[in-house]
Image (cartoon, rainbow, N blue to C red):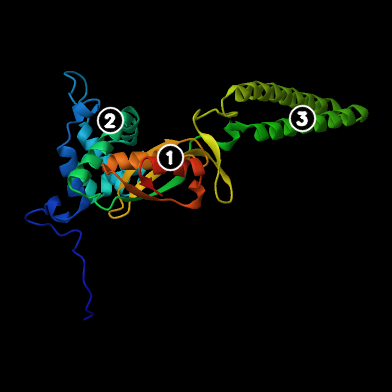
Amino acid sequence: MKRFIEGADRTQSTLLPACIDDYVAEDNPVRVIEAFVDELDLGELGFEGVEPEATGRPGYRPSSLLKIYIYGYLNRIQSSRRLEHESQRNVELMWLTGRLTPDFKTIADFRKDNGAAIRRVCREFILLCRRLQLFSLALVSIDGSKFKAVNNRDRNFTNAKMKRRIAEVEASIDGYLRQLDTADRQERSNTDAKGVQLREKIAHLKQEMERLKALDTRMREAPDQQLSLTDPDARSMKTRGSGVVGYNVQTAVDAKHHLIVAHEVTNVGSDRSQLAGMAKQAQAAMDVEQLDAVADRGYFHGEEILKCEQVAAVI
C-alpha cells in the first residue's frame, strides 16, 4: 500500500458540518479587517446607506462592502468582477462577509459613491498605526507608479499626436484623390461603382478632418495642451519602453512595517516636482518632527530638496 496523504471523500456525509470559522486561523489578516471595520463609525466617516431605507429592497451594509474592498486591496484584487467571483469561492471572504455575494456592480458603485469616505478610512488606519507606535523609525521610501486609465491612446491628444493624425488623414485623402483620378480615366464597367466608393471615403475623411480640427482647438485651450476624451483628467505619460495614458500615483511607504503612510494621485508624468509634497504628507501622517525620506534620482530637483530641508524632512 502506497503511503500518501489522502483527501476526504467528497460524497461522505458528516454528522456535524464543519464550522467555517475553523478554516480561518487565529492570525489570519481577515480577522484584523473584521476588528478594524467593526470599530469604525461609518456614518461619521461619510458612508452612504448607513441607515437603511424604510421601503424598497434591503441593501448591503456598508461595513460588509468595505470589508470586501479592503480585502481586495490587501490581496491585489482590483477588479470588481474578480471580487464578486472571489466572494463566491474564497473561504476567507465567506468568513469575512457571512457568505454574502454582492454582484460586481454593487461593489463598483460602492467604491465610486464613497471615495471620500474611503480616504477617511485610510486616515483612521494611519491614526491607529500612530497610536500603536508603528512609525517609530521615522523613515519612508517615496516612489511613483504609472496606472493605466480607461482612456484609450486613440482618444488622447497632444500637439505631436494631433499633427501626426492630421498628416495621416491628409495623406489618405491625397491617396484616394489620385485613385479617383485614375478611375475617371479608365473605361471599364465598374469604374462608376469604384468612383462612388472613393468619393464616399473622401467625404468620410473630410469629416474626420473637421473633427480633428475641432479637437485641436479644445486641446490648445487646455492648460497643459493635452486632451483626453474618456477620462478628462488622464494624461499621456512616458514609461519604460512605451507610453501610457493614465495617472502617476505617488506613495510614501514606512520602511519598518512597509505601510503606506501617504499617497496622492496626480496626472503629472514626471516625479521631479512631487518630492516635497509627499514628504510633508508623510511627516504629518507619522506625526514626527524630523523625517528621513529615500527616493530615486527621478526626484532630484534642487528646489524640492530645499523645501524638504525647510520642513525638516531629510532626503
**Is residue 166 something that shows in the picture?**
yes
Q: In which quarter of the image is residue 59?
A: top left
Comparing 216 with 263, the one in front is: 263
Q: x, y percentage for residue 310?
A: 39, 40
Q: How far apart are marks 3 and 2 (CA)?
A: 50 Å
Mark number, residue 307: 1
| Crowding at mark 1 (Cα within 10 Å: few <14, some 14-19, many 20+) | some
User: Above or below — where is 183 with respect to 273?
Assistant: above
- For mark 3, give the secondary structure: helix
Question: Which is nearer the N-term, disc 3 or disc 1?
Answer: 3
- For mark 2, give the secondary structure: helix
The residue labelled by disc 2 is: 117
15 relative position to 84: left or right: left
**Is residue 98 something that shows in the picture?**
no
Q: Residue at x 31, y 52 (%)?
A: 258
User: Above or below — where is 292 with respect to 200?
Assistant: below
The residue labelled by disc 3 is: 170
Disc 2 + disc 1, Cβ < 8 Å? no
Front label number (2 vs 1): 1
Disc 3 + disc 1, Cβ < 8 Å? no
Q: How far apart are marks 3 and 1 (CA)?
A: 49 Å
